[in-house]
Image: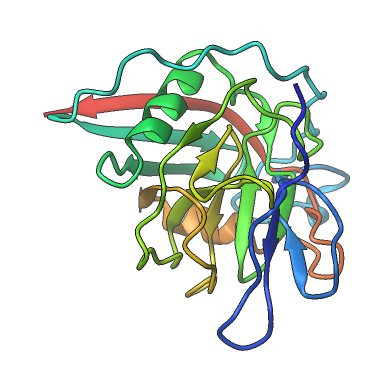
């Protein structure tokens, strides 16, 4: 099942408009969230240092996933390790802020949902976005979760949050996520805050430079090879 595109707004100064749809071109004040990958094409001179030269993966159908029936064990620390064509970064999930979303991401990762997908949209100094096997920016798992953010939720560098459409309630999430690469994205508290990058922030920053500011498209494919779930006491 495809969802309407989710966009992430950005305005001059301290303000930015909402993340509303995961794919698309918007009004001048609005930025769309999308995935992309490192590597892509051509000769070695076009390959970014630290990134492999890879092809963009073929789109896959979305939907058909089942929402997890049980919450994660809150006595454990849950992590997701993203192996990408530009290196590996780790995310520690926030079960206090987004227990439903965290359980969903763990379930999807275990099913290989994110494997061989790309960051379809990269906005330098703002965010990188992924999590859509259709590579279109409008895909999802076929269900949604909801974890309403706190009024003081902050979207600062390294924060991982979930994209949603403009019409969905605050905290609604499917599978598309974004990682903040700017100091402060300046977003309103409407996007489920599911975790923080705790290792490999340099990889996230490397990926974050591989976008065209005018189109918000990646300048070379950045592919997620796999996402590994970790848990510890």
**Whether residue 172 is situated above or below residue 188 in the rendered picture:** above
Residue at 44% in and 68% down: 156
Q: Is residue 58 left or right of residue 35?
A: right
> Which quadrant: the C terminus?
top left
Q: Is residue 216 left or right of residue 52?
A: right
Measured as percent of width and height from the top left, residue 34 is found at: 72, 49
Q: Is residue 62 visible?
A: yes
Residue at 76% in and 40% down: 137
Q: Which of 112 and 83 lies nearest the eye of the viewer? A: 112
Measured as percent of width and height from the top left, residue 226 is found at: 54, 25
**Whether residue 16 is situated above or below residue 52 in the rendered picture:** below
Measured as percent of width and height from the top left, residue 125 is found at: 61, 71
**Whether residue 40 is situated above or below residue 33 in the rendered picture:** above
> How many marks do you count on the picture?
0
Q: Is residue 8 left or right of residue 202?
A: right
Measured as percent of width and height from the top left, residue 51 is found at: 64, 47
Displayed quadrant of residue 2: top right
Q: Which of 85 and 75 lies nearest the eye of the viewer? A: 75
Residue at 65% in and 11% down: 64
Q: Colour scheme of this structure image? A: rainbow
């Amino acid at each position: 099942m495809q969802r309407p595109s989710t966009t992430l707004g950005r305005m001059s100064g301290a303000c930015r408009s909402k993340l509303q749809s995961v794919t698309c071109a918007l009004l001048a004040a609005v930025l769309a969230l999308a995935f992309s990958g490192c590597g892509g094409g051509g000769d070695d001179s076009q390959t970014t240092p630290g990134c492999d030269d890879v092809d963009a993966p073929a789109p896959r159908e979305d939907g058909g996933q089942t929402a997890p029936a049980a919450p994660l064990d809150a006595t454990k620390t849950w992590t997701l390790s993203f192996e990408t064509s530009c290196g590996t970064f780790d995310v520690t999930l926030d079960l206090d802020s987004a227990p439903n979303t965290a359980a969903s991401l763990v379930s999807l990762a275990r099913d290989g949902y994110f494997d061989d997908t790309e960051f379809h949209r990269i906005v330098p100094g703002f965010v990188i976005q992924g999590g859509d096997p259709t590579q279109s920016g409008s895909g999802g798992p076929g269900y949604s979760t909801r974890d309403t953010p706190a009024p003081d939720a902050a979207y600062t560098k390294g924060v991982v949050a979930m994209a949603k459409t403009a019409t969905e309630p605050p905290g609604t999430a499917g599978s598309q996520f974004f990682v903040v690469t700017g100091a402060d994205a300046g977003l309103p508290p409407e996007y489920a805050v599911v975790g923080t990058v705790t290792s490999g922030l340099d990889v996230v920053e490397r990926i974050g430079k591989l976008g065209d500011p005018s189109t918000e498209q990646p300048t070379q494919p950045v592919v997620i090879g796999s996402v590994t779930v970790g848990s510890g006491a």
